[in-house]
Amino acid sequence: MKKPSPFLAAALSGALFVSFSAAAQAAPRIKKTRRKPAAVITTAATAPTAPVLSAELKALLAQAPSAKDYPNAAKATLLDVADIQVRPDGSARTVTRQLIKVFNERGRDEAEVRIPYNHAFERVTITRARTIKSNGQILSVKPSDVRDHAVDEGEDSYSDARIKSFSLPAVDDGAVLEYEYVTDQKAPLMPGQFWTRWWFQTGSDPVVESRLTVTMPKGLAVKEALKNTDLKPVTKESADGSKITRVWRSRGVPSIEWEPMMPGAERIAPHLALSTVGTWQDIAAWYWTLAKDRANPDAAIKAQTAALIKGKTTPEEKAKAIFYHVEEKTRYVALEYGIGGYQPRRAADVSRNQYGDCKDMTTLLVAMLKEAGITAHPVLLRAGSTAKVSDELPSPHAFNHAICLAEINGKKFWLDATAQLASWGVVPGGDRGAQAFVIRDGVGSWEVIPHAAPEENRLEQTAKLTLAADGSATGTVRVQGTGDADMGLRGALFFTRPDKVKEMVERMAQGIGANAKVTKYTVSDFRNKDLPVTITYDVTLPSWAQKSGSMLLFKARAEQSAGSGSSPFLQETREHPIFQDSSGVLESTVEIAIPAGYSPLSMPEPLEVKSDLGIFRRTVTNKDNALTIAVRAENHRADIPAARYSEVRKYYDDMVKVADEPIILKKG
């Protein structure tokens, strides 16, 4: 399951008027995984470590920076190196070494080391793991303290993906952490092919030296692609002319300063990709070889398909019935053992077992749709990213998800059965905008899954309140969504115990007014994905407006408890672009019956605040002693250069300012 949409958080808080601040303040994640695809990394036993320091290590420690050199950093990576020996068949042996100096308590998390690997393809041997304290004392990790366990312990996971983990002992400020391990790949995923990725900056803290050394047979041609750096390798040929060694060394990599709404690591951190794979068509042919026979339907699938489409008259009705069947009847689990990390299981097995991962569910969809006479193809993509993958070096590493494309009467339907909650025709937000690799009978083609227009991700709240002279209010509120917003509401109800639904609705009401009490509520049939989820509730709000003498004051919006907060853009200058890769609409309308004897003393004028990031509109009208406040906030996809930072700051400052403008009612 993908994590719930951010629209859900907005719905549950009742904060429907300024939708941007939560996304703006979410910290970007700088990737730490550098090398091979998730299904390609290794493990075994831990060798004893001699408590001595080499001359090289002593020199590194003597020259190491101190916390004073980097007052804002948690740590500094003194040495981040990997030495890869590639064999003629594409498999490799990698020696990885880390040397990290801890500056403060925030850096002590580095003492928890996790080394991922795939048991079917790899073996990992830890050769050194120790703490060098600031007083020179050396404490090594004991072999018995190394743990070997599944990646997703306690979750539905049937996988050869495992973790070797250990805790480095006695870590305090000024301590240096050192560990080294060997990853031995037993066999390549693609015979004769090698690929890897290396990040010269892992995390946001500084790196003194990052170095990748790759030795390959001379006849194994490799392509390289560097991003966010102009680093050049040093190349050397072996004495007998059979091997080529390339060394990429980066020194003094500075800290990456976090900024709100900055792009991801792909656009910020320096990194290198290597691949011997010739073209993307080689990837398509390889995957097709693994997958084509797996989509052949057996007698059970044929019978199930016939039952599902019985009485359906159009291809779209048939496809919809099949999609809902696979989405609702197939339990998603991670199944990444052996070649199964890339090869789907047979559609017949997936249908019989009623579980599978994304590529398994896609294969079952393709099999059933084709059996119903509908054109369908497997699709590989990088979910959660809108990067132009086709410009990268070809490798299976490029993809992390699989879905199905159905083509019906000239229209394309992108079907992601793993979403579990998606209505027919709705593409989950994590797939939107991704460059998809569609494989039609072994031939790959690149297509972009359409981005959602703001109206396709819409969360709407309408309220009718009666305000009393003491500032309390009663009324009815209705919430409904489309797209990701609908999936968010549906997921909240789907995963909430029936006896806890009222509590969930009451949490939504808390954004409208403090200490809100829901007296009655109704929820639409959220299991019917052909209808939008609708939640309606009656609420009592003991202090919706503030009373001051003969006046009542409240904000010009329905939500009195959920505040607009402050702008996330507090820095005076900006280094990185401002990046927003989603769009949506949050709309709130409230009708307020004014208490007898009161009339508006002050009301905000209609307004519109605009920028490339979105639009905020509000109107307040008064008719027959009733106020109507209408607020509409739109998110727009945007990529704004840092040079225009002042415009973005002004937009947020203006929006925060107007979002809290009050309405004042005066008695008499």
Image (spheres, grey):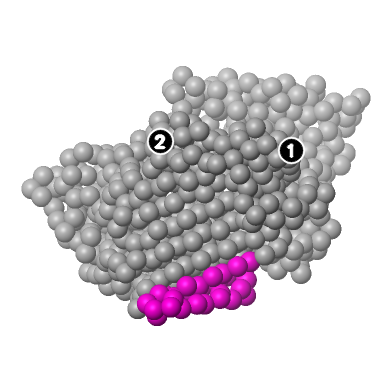
Percent position (x, y) of residue 105?
71, 37
Q: Of 340 and 633, which appears nearest the observer? A: 340
Residues under labels 2 and 1: Cα distance? 34 Å
Percent position (x, y) of residue 645?
77, 63
Q: Quadrant of residue 158?
A: top left
Q: Name the outermost residue toward the bottom.
A: 241
Residue at 78%, 47% (x, y): give it.
67
Mark 1: which amino acid?
A: Asn
Q: Can I make out residue 140 in this image? A: yes
Q: Name the outermost residue toward the right.
A: 549
Instruction: Compare marks 2 and 1 and give the one earlier in the sequence.
Output: 1
Residue at disc 1, secondary structure: loop
Residue at 45%, 62% (x, y): give it.
84
Q: Which residues are magenta?
A: 221-250
* Residue 247 forms part of the magenta stretch: yes
Residue linked to disc 1: 135
- Category of crowding for the residue at label 2, using alpha-carbon neighbours closer than 10 angstroms: few (below 14), some (14–19), many (at least 20): some
Q: Of 467 and 242, which appears nearest the observer? A: 242
* Residue 60 forms part of the magenta stretch: no
Residue linked to disc 2: 149
- Category of crowding for the residue at label 1, using alpha-carbon neighbours closer than 10 angstroms: few (below 14), some (14–19), many (at least 20): few
Res. 249 mark? none
Percent position (x, y) of residue 314?
22, 57
Q: Can I make out residue 409 in this image? A: no
> Closer to the camera: disc 2 or disc 1?
1
Residue at 60%, 28% (x, y): give it.
507
Q: Quarter holding the N terminus?
A: top left
- Left or right? Give the position of 80 relative to 351: right
Mark 2: which amino acid?
A: His
- Left or right? Give the position of 289 relative to 452: left
